[in-house]
């Protein structure tokens, strides 16, 4: 299975998405070997790295992970939209506004991860989490959309996107919620295991959403 995280951006020296994903690289969850790949926080460069990783690993489950600074807890993303509208430049200085991820592509794709079952599993483990209806319009959403488009005909591969909050030291600086790295790692492990072992999804109200 494949996990991706992003390099630091926006003046930060760390990106907790990559820190958490990297810690799981080489581990085995529910009998599946985990491969972690770092993506550039660049509109032009991120997708070729993603596509190469998909070809190289042929994964059963793919979870792309990104940073949503300011959010509290783990965000299980539900929807990727065909839109880029960058509020800040990426790491290459590009700042596209009001352009599609894929010209002529579908308006949106839903995650194929069992997001509600994952939410329940995280809550049972005492980890703050919620289902989010928007992954934004920055590089995270671009990767999420491109991932779901690439796998749209692969019925046996589950995929989706998860946002993590700031690390505590970043959160203190920004005056925002944070989460320890070990908690993020534990959360990702639970989401991976749920995706690999849950056939359908829970049919419950999602609770707090964003």
Image (spheres, helix red, strand yellow):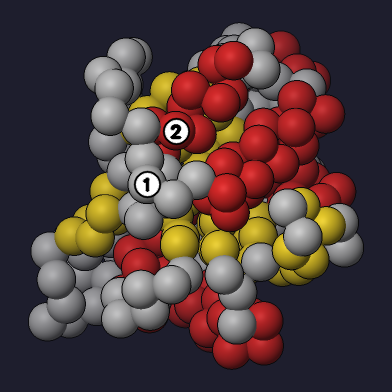
Residue at 59% in and 34% down:
164
Is 114 left or right of 8, judged from the image as shown?
left
Horizontal arrangement in the rendering, residue 121 relative to residue 17 (left or right): left
Nearer the observer, 76 or 195 = 195
Give whichever of 18, 32 is nearer the camera: 32
Question: Where in the figure is residue 195, as x and y percent of width and height?
Answer: 53, 49
User: Residues at badges 2 and 1 in contact (C-beta under 8 Å)?
Assistant: yes
- Residue 14: quadrant of the picture: top right
**Local SS, label 2:** helix
Quadrant of image for the N terminus: bottom right
Q: Nearer the viewer, mark 2 or mark 1?
A: 1
**Residue 169, position in %: x, y?**
79, 20
Q: In this view, does 153 lie to the left or right of 197?
A: left
- Please tell me whether residue 139 is drawn above or below residue 19 in the rendered image: below
**Of pointers 2 and 1, the one earlier in the residue sequence:** 2
Q: Is residue 36 above or below residue 187?
A: below
The residue wearing badge 1 is: 200
Q: Which mark is residue 66?
A: none
Closer-to-camera residue (107/57)? 57
Q: In this view, does 8 lie above or below 3?
A: above
Query: Residue shown at 67%/81% (left/top)?
Result: 57
In the displayed structure image, the side of residue 46 where residue 170 appears, left or right: right
Q: Mark 2 points at which residue?
A: 117
- Other-residue count near label 1 (Cα within 10 Å), few / some / many at <14 / 14–19 / ≥20: few
Residue 49 image offset from top left, x and y in percent: 60, 80
SS label for mark 1: loop
Task: Work out whether 122 lies above or below 92.
Answer: above
In which quadrant will I find the C terminus? top left
Q: Where is residue 163 in the image (x, y as percent from the top left)?
A: 52, 39
Q: Can residue 59 be seen at all in this image of the molecule?
A: yes
Measured Cα–Cα span from mark 2 to mark 1: 8 Å
| Neighbour tally class for label 2: few under 14, some 14-19, many 20 plus, Cα within 10 Å | many
């Amino acid at each position: 299975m494949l996990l991706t995280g992003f390099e630091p951006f926006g003046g930060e020296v760390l990106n907790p998405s990559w820190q958490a994903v990297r810690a799981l690289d080489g581990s085995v969850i529910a009998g599946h070997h985990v491969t972690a790949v770092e993506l550039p926080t660049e509109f032009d460069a991120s997708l070729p790295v993603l596509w190469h990783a998909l070809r190289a690993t042929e994964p059963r489950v793919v979870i792309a992970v990104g940073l949503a600074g300011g959010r509290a807890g783990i965000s299980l993303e539900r929807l990727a939209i065909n839109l880029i509208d960058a509020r800040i430049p990426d790491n290459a200085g590009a700042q596209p506004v009001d352009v599609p991820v894929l010209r002529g592509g579908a308006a949106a794709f839903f995650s194929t991860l069992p997001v509600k079952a994952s939410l329940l599993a995280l809550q049972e483990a005492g980890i703050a989490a919620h289902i989010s209806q928007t992954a934004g319009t920055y590089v995270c959403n671009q990767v999420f959309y491109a991932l779901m488009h690439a796998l749209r005909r692969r019925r046996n591969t589950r995929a989706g996107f998860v946002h993590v909050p700031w690390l505590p030291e970043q959160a203190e600086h920004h005056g925002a919620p944070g989460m320890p790295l070990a908690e993020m790692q534990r959360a990702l492990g639970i989401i991976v295991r749920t995706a690999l072992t849950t056939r359908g999804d829970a049919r419950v109200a999602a609770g707090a959403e964003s």
